Amino acid sequence: MAGLETRPGRGRKAILQEQDLESVRQVVAQHRQRLSVAKTELEQALGKSFSQETLARFVKKTVDSTSVCENARAASRMRKFTHSKSKA
């Protein structure tokens, strides 16, 4: 039975990790419409090789989710501001 337990550390480790987040965010912001250009620039800067799909997945999981949260917070603040202004 002990041999059937799932042990930690199985599977391939992620190529792009949390420490790469700021670099990815900056490069993607510069080349928002051309992910292939961002990929080439990041590969050189980080010294890692990865596919465009890997970059797209990483951006979708990390960069987009943080910008969505920031946009939601900004929209919430704007609603509060306009709502309080309309009552006055």
Image (cartoon, grey):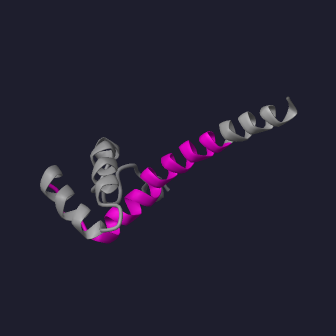
Between 64 and 12, the one lying in front of the other is 64
Q: Please name the residue shown 33% across and 46% down the image.
A: 21
Q: Please name the residue shown 20% across and 56% down the image.
A: 42
Image position, residue 53 (x, y; %): 34, 70
Question: Which residues, given as a range, are shown in magenta?
Answer: 47-75
Which secondary structure is most common in the magenta stretch?
helix
Q: Please name the residue shown 34% across and 60% down the image.
A: 11
The stretch drawn in magenta includes residue 68: yes
The stretch drawn in magenta includes residue 83: no
Look at the image and tell me in which quarter the C terminus lies. Answer: top right
Between 71 and 78, the one lying in front of the other is 78
Between 36 and 30, the one lying in front of the other is 30
Count the labels in the image: 0
Image position, residue 60 (x, y; %): 45, 60
**Residue 15 occupies quadrant:** bottom left
31 relative to 57 in the view: left or right: left
Image position, residue 58 (x, y; %): 38, 58
Image position, residue 3 (x, y; %): 42, 57
In the rendered image of this protein, does residue 40 appear above or below residue 70? below
Q: Please name the residue shown 55% across and 50% down the image.
A: 68
Point out the residue furthest to the top here.
88
